[in-house]
Image (tube, helix red, strand yellow):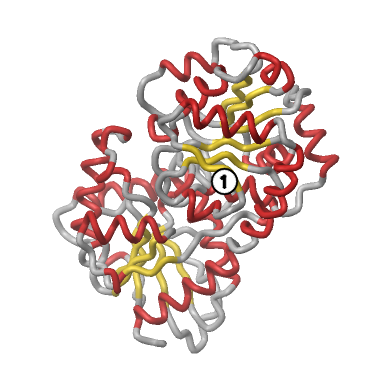
Amino acid sequence: MRKIGKDEGASVSLLLDASPLLLRSAGVKNYVYYWVRSLAEHAGANRLELFPFLRGLGTFAHEKSVLSHAATLPRLGLLYAANICPFPFLNWLTPASDIFHASHQVLHPPRKARMTSTIYDMTCWLMPEVHAAANVKAADRIANGVFRPAQGLIAISECTRADAVRVLNLPPEKIEVIYPGIAPAFFDVDADAARETARRYSLVKPYALYVGSIEPRKNVATMLDAWLDLPGDVREEFDLVVIGPWGWGDRTVYDRLQAGIAGVRYLGYVPEPDLPALTAAATIFVYLSLYEGFGLPVGQAMAAGVPVVASLASALPEVVGDAGLLADPRSRAEIRGGMERLLLSPSLRAQLTERGKKRAAAFTWDECARKSWKFFERVAGHD
């Protein structure tokens, strides 16, 4: 396996489980991909290796592995075998390291190194009804097999940390909050390129934008209802554009999005390279999730200079601060009011755009990587 980062006089040897990069995934995969890149750039004297034997990151895409099909299958086979085997054979197969940072895919992490992990959100415990039963069951296994025995944990927001302490009774001193970053491409989108990309997708009217998977937690049905509650003249002036693949759950909202509702454009999955431009070309961004551990699409919108209407639930107020409008995600009236107010007020949009850019500047992968290495050094006892 290729070592990423310097290895002479290494302060910390980190083996990071990058198996989410081999799967179809959205937020977690995005996090791992950009986090690994930044950890490698800021490794210094530390050493970074990737499990299961990844020698490079490949090309990022939500819908497929970062590796070829031929390279992915044996690695997923190893992961599957490790999860069903009663013996801890990862202790024998993985290279020696100070720390093994476990993903939520490995049910029996190697125990020869100190273990850490990332807590992304607590919805499986707080709102099991918005997750598939298999995910809820797996979450309990991760809590008992990874979170509780871990020597250190990263939470991606203060909200996630507080919920993990309260719900799982984890020691608060074991969990450090380290915010994820926003991909640099969202901070510097050329206006002409944004307009051209929008035209390529036949988006000719100003639009409100949602980006995310279509699943119960994302609350897309209520957002769509609130949009259709807007006055007719507002919906004549603006479109609602929905970007994101089908996830799981009741397909009613998915069928509605594909039904050709006037003024509602469903683009489905959009390749990652087009997202910054399509985001920057939007008039406003709407994101009314019932629960988020962070809410990366909201941060991306702010970085791209797009004012947001976001849910006041979970970590989203922590991310948005005073840089957007917040609404009760279960209230069609509040959501509709927030969208209408922002769509019809250029001055408010301009004000929130400036605040949003400043707010988003606090969420960089460089800062995330620096804090992460300090965290690993403390866990390894090298601080």
Closer to the camera in the image, 63 or 353 = 353
Task: Left or right? Give the position of 136 relative to 203.
Answer: left
Figure check: 208 above or below 76: above
Image point 49% across, 62% down: which residue? 179
Residue matched to label 1: 298
Spot occupied by residue 165 in the image (x, y as percentages of width and height): 26, 61
Closer to us: 344 or 2: 344
Residue at x 75% of width, y 22% of height: 202
Name the residue rendered at 48%, 46% in the picture.
27
Q: Secondary structure at mark 1?
A: helix
Q: Quadrant of residue 169?
A: bottom left
Looking at the image, how many numbered discs can be counted on the residues? 1
- Residue 178 seen anywhere in this rendered image of the structure: yes
Seen at 48% across and 42% down, the residue is 26
Counting from the top left corner in percent of width and height, residue 93 is at 30, 65
Q: Residues within 10 Å of mark 1 (few under 14, many from 20)?
A: many
Q: Quadrant of the C terminus?
A: bottom left
**Amino acid on which the number 1 mark rests in the picture:** Val
Q: Is residue 359 above or below residue 375?
A: above
Residue 21 in view (yes/no): no
Q: Position of residue 359 (x, y in %)?
A: 62, 58
Q: Residue furthest left?
A: 86
Q: In the visual, does 362 lie left or right of 69?
A: right
The one of 340 and 137 positioned closer to us in this rendering:
340
Please state the horizontal and vertical placement of residue 334, each as a whole percent of the image.
50, 31
Q: Residue 150's image quarter?
A: bottom left
